[in-house]
Image (tube, rainbow, N blue to C red):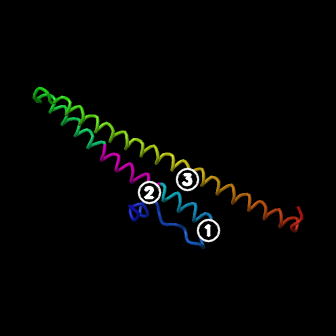
Amino acid sequence: MGSLFTNAYGPLPTPAQATQIHVQAIDAGDASAQASMQMSVMADAAAASTVQVANSIESQALTTSPGSAPQLEAQALASEISSMAIEHKLLAVQLRSEAARLAYNGAQFKQAATNSGNAVQGVFGGAK
């Protein structure tokens, strides 16, 4: 995923192209985006698998012998739990992505405050 991501979105800037804080923020954002992409691929595969399991259980229900309904019900419940676990993983990825976005915004505010403070010191010779 790393090389595909870099080919699509470009490499990190060099220290000559950006400040260290910007490089770190971009790197953290890229890592979060890659993790989200990987999770979405996994979720797509899991969704396809869940549909296959559901179709299989449905087919078995049509041809099942008397008395095996509890076994099919157990299979269906296990599949439901698995699906819910994947849903929770996706929600966790969304929370991490939002946390990364907030951290990125915080880094921008910190950089702006530092630049503003440096400008004030430059104009007034350090007297505030």
Residue at disc 1, secondary structure: helix
Label 3 sits on a secondary structure element that is helix
Residue 122 shown left or right of residue 8 in the figure: right
Seen from the viewer's position, the closer of residues 27 and 55 is 55
Residue 99 lies, in percent from the top left, at 56, 50
Percent x, y of residue 48: 27, 43
Looking at the rendering, the stretch of residues picked out in magenta corresponds to 33-46
Figure label count: 3
Q: Quadrant of residue 5?
A: bottom left
Q: Amino acid at mark 2?
A: Gln
Where is mark 2, residue-wise?
Answer: 34
Q: Which residue is mark 1?
A: 20
Whether residue 37 is in magenta: the answer is: yes
* Residue 124 location, quadrant: bottom right
Q: Which residue is mark 3?
A: 100
- Residue 99 tag number: none
The answer for how far apart the CA atoms under marks 3 and 2 are is 12 Å
Q: Is residue 41 left or right of residue 115?
A: left
Residue 73 x/y as whole percent: 23, 31
Callout 3, which amino acid?
Ala
